[in-house]
Amino acid sequence: MSPLARFVLPALAATGTAYAACSISGTTTIENNGDATAMASCTTFTGGIAIETGVQEPISISGVRELDGDLSVKNNSNLESISADSLETIKGKFELNDVRALNTLSFPKLSTVEEIQWVALPKLQNLEFTAEVKKAATVVISNTQLQSLKGINIETIDKIDINNNPYISDISMQLGNITTSLNLEANNPEVNITFPNLEWAFNMTFRNCSSIDLPSLETLNGSMGLYGNVLSGFAAPNLTKIGGALALVSNTEMTNLSLPELTEVSQNLQIANNTKLHKIDGLPKLKTIGGALDFNGNFTEVSLPALNDVDGAFNLQSTGDVQGQCDDFFKPLSDKKRIKGKFTCFGSVAKPGGQGTTPTVTGANSKKTGAASTLNVQKNAAMGLMGLAAAFFM
Ligand SMILES: *[C@@H]1O[C@H](CO)[C@@H](O)[C@H](O)[C@H]1NC(C)=O
Ligand SMILES: *[C@@H]1O[C@H](CO)[C@@H](O)[C@H](O)[C@H]1NC(C)=O
Ligand SMILES: *[C@@H]1O[C@H](CO)[C@@H](O)[C@H](O)[C@H]1NC(C)=O
Ligand SMILES: *[C@@H]1O[C@H](CO)[C@@H](O)[C@H](O)[C@H]1NC(C)=O
Ligand SMILES: *[C@@H]1O[C@H](CO)[C@@H](O)[C@H](O)[C@H]1NC(C)=O
Ligand SMILES: *[C@@H]1O[C@H](CO)[C@@H](O)[C@H](O)[C@H]1NC(C)=O
Ligand SMILES: *[C@@H]1O[C@H](CO)[C@@H](O)[C@H](O)[C@H]1NC(C)=O
Ligand SMILES: *[C@@H]1O[C@H](CO)[C@@H](O)[C@H](O)[C@H]1NC(C)=O
Ligand SMILES: *[C@@H]1O[C@H](CO)[C@@H](O)[C@H](O)[C@H]1NC(C)=O
Ligand SMILES: *[C@@H]1O[C@H](CO)[C@@H](O)[C@H](O)[C@H]1NC(C)=O
């Protein structure tokens, strides 16, 4: 850029009213709305725009269509609204951090932002984003009063993190892929999640969601975790491969798990503390687990008919009577070294635990031994787990 072009004076300057440079090196600080309206003639503003800590009156950045820099407001306790009637693109960060009175953001034309970082906006309720933001590499939205993310409808994203928005009722986007990570946590516990077009994602973590709909998901390049959700079931009808681990933990209302096309989990597969999940019958094609299998819960049935290769340990502990499945299906896989790591498989366990815990088997569960006593494995340390399995179940 030539030195002259760096300071283009708007026509208004000639009349003696406000003017602004449309290109600066660094950041311009808006101290009142006059500073914002002074930018009106800049179709493109090059440089950062920051709104000062003490600003109270609504700020309206009009005229500017493209911002080649960041737009940021930090640590402001009085500002209630920010608008930009013409702004289509923010090439840098759109950062709002600790703006305690902010209620409304009105950006009707905004469609492209490099990064959205909206954190600690406890009064933010209204997003007026008519054109919808369709492109962003990163979206972080944390601690707001938003009820909806209408207006944020990204197609491809690197990183998305939506947490601690207690009023949000649904999160739904056209996302086709997530190249780094998705994290949804501690929002409205009733929040419904829908990503109808999502075909692949790297890592995904869902906590405290009420339903998760991923009808198109085919590949997880990395790992997926579902923790503490209140959903009644989880299905990923098109998911074939998980490049990392899969964990389903403490989803206390989940009764149904359906991953009908899943053939491979490259690292650990953990299913734990999903209190009401009684049947694991939704993994008909799962053949390979590159890490450990670690299941504990109240299962009456654990069916993995295609399982042929577990590289790590195998731990299955259930309050329900799955001993038949342990003895008839899983034990032979261990004997044939299809399960390579330490093998633990018990039904009728009082308090089923994760890998490395010692199960306490109760009651007359073993169809082969008919033993009617309570057996505390810990008191039989000398026997060891393998010895125990041998003594009772072979
Ligand atoms: C926030 O702004 C107030 C003035 O409004 C100032 O006193 C305080 O130091 C600022 N805090 C931080 C963390 O910047
Ligand atoms: C989520 O979907 C369920 C079922 O359709 C509905 O009952 C619930 O109200 C939805 N949650 C919210 C916060 O709207
Ligand atoms: C990612 O998703 C977008 C939107 O659906 C799609 O246009 C693009 O081709 C996808 N990229 C890859 C590498 O799958
Ligand atoms: C995905 O998650 C795993 C395990 O937490 C981590 O090691 C890895 O770096 C993550 N990958 C990306 C791209 O975020
Ligand atoms: C599921 O995968 C099949 C085969 O790749 C594809 O034809 C179908 O459209 C996918 N379904 C959804 C809902 O994406
Ligand atoms: C993830 O897997 C999909 C499908 O195999 C592939 O198209 C995509 O390039 C992979 N993404 C990354 C970041 O490895
Ligand atoms: C959210 O999930 C976590 C587990 O990941 C759990 O500890 C927490 O209690 C849940 N919070 C709510 C509000 O349900
Ligand atoms: C379990 O999920 C599958 C797939 O989503 C569905 O077809 C089936 O009806 C569900 N079963 C129960 C008992 O909810
Ligand atoms: C399952 O619950 C038990 C008992 O509350 C706890 O000790 C254990 O850490 C939980 N397991 C996981 C994987 O969270
Ligand atoms: C089994 O169910 C009981 C009662 O519903 C519950 O307290 C316990 O946490 C469940 N155990 C596991 C491992 O999910």
Image: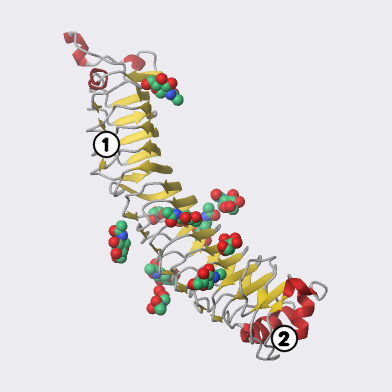
Q: Quadrant of residue 193?
A: bottom left
Q: Which mark is residue 27?
A: none
| Residue 262 drawn at (x, y percent) | 52, 71
Considering the image in quadrants, where does the N terminus appear?
top left
**Counting other residues with Cα less than 10 Å from the Cα at mark 1, is it few (<14), some (14-19), or many (20 or more)?**
many
| Residue 46 drawn at (x, y percent) | 36, 24
Q: Which residue is mark 2?
A: 393
| Residue 267 drawn at (x, y percent) | 63, 63
Considering the image in quadrants, where does the C terminus appear?
bottom right
Q: Which residue is mark 1?
A: 103
Left or right of 223 on screen, residue 328: right
CB-based contact (under 8 Å), mark 1 and mark 2? no
The count of marks equals 2
Question: Which residue is painted at 59% across and 83% down in the image?
Answer: 321
In-front residue for pair 272/380:
380
In-front residue for pair 287/346:
346
Spatial CA span between label 1 and label 2: 65 Å
Label 1 near ligand 1 (CB < 8 Å): no
Q: Quadrant of ligand 1?
A: top left
Q: Is residue 336 visible?
A: no
Q: Amino acid at mark 2?
A: Phe
Q: Nearer the viewer, mark 1 or mark 2?
A: 2
Left or right of 270 on screen, residue 186: left
In-front residue for pair 51/221:
51
Figure check: 192 above or below 293 = above
Q: Is residue 372 visible?
A: yes
Secondary structure found at label 2: helix
Q: Quadrant of residue 55?
A: top left
Question: Which residue is painted at 54% across and 81% down in the image?
Answer: 300
Q: Amino acid at mark 1?
A: Asn
Secondary structure found at label 1: loop
Q: Earlier in the sequence, mark 1 or mark 2?
A: 1
